Amino acid sequence: MESWLLETPQMSQDTLRAIKRGIDKGYMEFSRAYGADIEAAFEPMLYFLIWFEKLLLSAPWWSIILVITAITWFAARRWTLVFGVVIALLLIGYFGMWENTMRTMAMILVCTLLAILIGIPIGILMSRSDRTQSTVLPVLDVMQTMPSFVYLIPVVMLLGIGKVPGLLAVVIYAIPPVIRLTNLGIRLVDREVLEAADAFGASKWQKLCDIQIPLAMPNIMAGINQTIMMALAMVVIASMIGVKGLGQPVLQAVTNQYFALGLFNGLAVVALAIIFDRVTQSWGLRMQTYRQGTGDE
Amino acid sequence: MSDTVISVRDLYKVFGDDPTNAMKLVRDGIGKDDLLERTGHVIGLSDINLQIERRQIQVVMGLSGSGKSTLIRHLNRLVEPTEGMIKVDGQDIMAYGEKDLLEFRRHNISMVFQRFSLFPHRTVLENIGYGLNTQQQPKVEIKTRAMRWIDRVGLSGYEDYFPAQLSGGMQQRVGLARALATDAEILLMDEAFSALDPLIRAEMQTILLDLQEELHKTIVFITHDLDEALHIGDRIAILRDGEIIQDDDPQNIIMKPADDYVADFMKDINRSRVVRARSIMTNLRGTETGPKINASMILENVAQVMGMTPDKACIVINKQGEPVGRLTIADVIKGMARPNSSGTRIT
């Protein structure tokens, strides 16, 4: 039988090698030429991250717990949740993981903030035009399915090892849900309600701020919640490019087969995840109290 | 002394991918079915001409699918016509740019919706103040004006409730107050009371008529309910398959239906409650005695008056108290009787 029926048609090894080399070389040149500028552009972010990390690390542990407790209470208004959060944080401290947890928390919060600041406007733009939606959606699909290690390579080539490349990698990995759900949430707003806004002469901006975003808020909050969860997952992987925090001991545990170390730090990540998740979810839920009737009907 | 506020001329609306081209066929007189078969376009409204007088309640009545909701949405350009002219207070609103249109909707025209379309995340107070919000009035002003309207529609004490916490009737009061709060002169009501149960509907009609006594808005009221149309309309336009078949005074619609379709509509109404004395009175003979009744009295009440007197006839007087006609018991009975199915009266 002909050989092309048995083997997939393949370009010659030389061509393939040349293509790979070409791409690598091109990107290398790009990063040499613009790496410094791009790094400089991220500088304010870096300062903010460092400042925030220092703040969390230097503040006394009890004041941090107090602040988190207060936030939990205002978001959820549930004593059981507040109690659970305090216990979890105390345990983290007791097991000697306080500093790493604070580093990870700083990273997650800054990443989430960035993802929200970039993601919500993109989601809004997507909701306004089907064409934007159909161009952005495949990009998001790629971002979500591309193995996360693959992002790390170009980011490291461009920016080296450290906090900023870590931040970038985490944001790229974690941003799709907030974009998707902002878009979806705005698209799901009742047409009749929008028609009413139109009938009263609402401008596009007034419609967006007064009607669409508030009504899309439950979905946007679900997106933010997902983004935080994904950021937490990525922050462990990002430890490979020098992001400090709970990821580093995990990485160390993997390479040295320290099961207990891995387990403790892993559980600390879980505890953080649960805290973030429950707080954002109950906040999202509380924002929808208007949906419940009192049974007057 | 006719004072036209809204003037609609030769209005057409064709739904489909390429309405402009389909419109050419419509102008050549193609039928509805042919158009659908040949081009996949649907005629929503066809050759609509409508003059709406200031301070009147113009009812547009038709069954579902007759195009009435489409028609009312043309008046504030929530729907754009395929062809035709719409003038409001002499201004061609089709010529408005985006900005003019927003201003027009903010200040001159407001709307009440069939399914209320309240903003679920805003309180009653914030809903009612919404139109003032888009007008960018100061916050204090919005609040005081919204509070006044809450009071007017009888919802005091509910200002901090959310729509989902209110019954249907209360929600539509919010809808009505929201529309009135902008002080727009024209009020569009798209089947505003159709979603409410009969008792609440009657109550809302009364509220509307009471408010109208005082406010003298120009109201365009869409309904599929003939009783409602006859109860509140100063004038009724009957729409069928996107065409107006009769646009007339309610009494004329009852007494002189334009065609069998309209006559068929009138078949089931309780004539004693809608036909008024002036519609069936006969000429004065000059020698009348008997009780005096108002020309706008409904036959049910005329019958009551006549039942209490020995006279066989009564004198119909106009608003100024001058006699304008007479009515006998036989006239009243005839007026109450339903015409036979062909639309002609049994004599």
Image (tube, coloured by chain):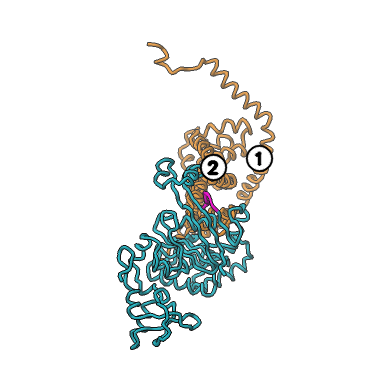
Chain colours: A orange, B cyan
Does any portion of residue A91 appear in the rendered image?
Answer: no
Quadrant of the rendered image containing residue B144: bottom right
Instruction: Say which amino acid is labelled 1.
Output: Phe
Q: Give the residue at mark 1.
A: A42
Task: Return the residue nearer the eye: A115 or A43.
Answer: A115
Prevailing secondary structure of the magenta residues = loop
Task: Return the residue nearer the eye: B218 or A110.
Answer: B218
Q: Chain of mark 2?
A: A
Q: Where is residue B332 drawn, in percent x and y?
A: 35, 77
The kind of secondary structure element at disc 2 is loop
Q: Is residue B235 left or right of residue A169?
A: left
Question: Which residue is at a point 56% across and 57% down the rendered structure image?
Answer: A66
Q: Where is residue A85 drawn, in percent x and y?
A: 49, 54
Question: Which residue is at a point 40% across and 11% down the rendered structure image?
Answer: A2
Q: Nearer the viewer, mark 1 or mark 2?
A: 2
Q: Earlier in the sequence, mark 1 or mark 2?
A: 1
Instruction: Say which amino acid is labelled 2.
Output: Ile
Question: Which residue is at a point 65% across and 42% down the rendered structure image?
Answer: A46
Quadrant of the rendered image containing residue B225: bottom left
The kind of secondary structure element at disc 1 is loop
Distance between the Cα atoms at labels 1 and 2?
17 Å
Q: How many callouts does the rendering have?
A: 2
Q: Is residue B68 magenta?
A: no
For label 1, the crowd category at 10 Å Cα-Cα, with few meaning under 14, some 14 to 19 and many 20 or more, is: some
Q: Chain of mark 1?
A: A
Question: Which residue is at a point 60% across and 33% down the rendered structure image?
Answer: A155
Q: Give the residue at mark 2.
A: A175
Q: Is residue B81 magenta?
A: yes
What range is drawn magenta here?
B79-84
Tell me if residue B228 comes above or below residue A3 in the rendering. below
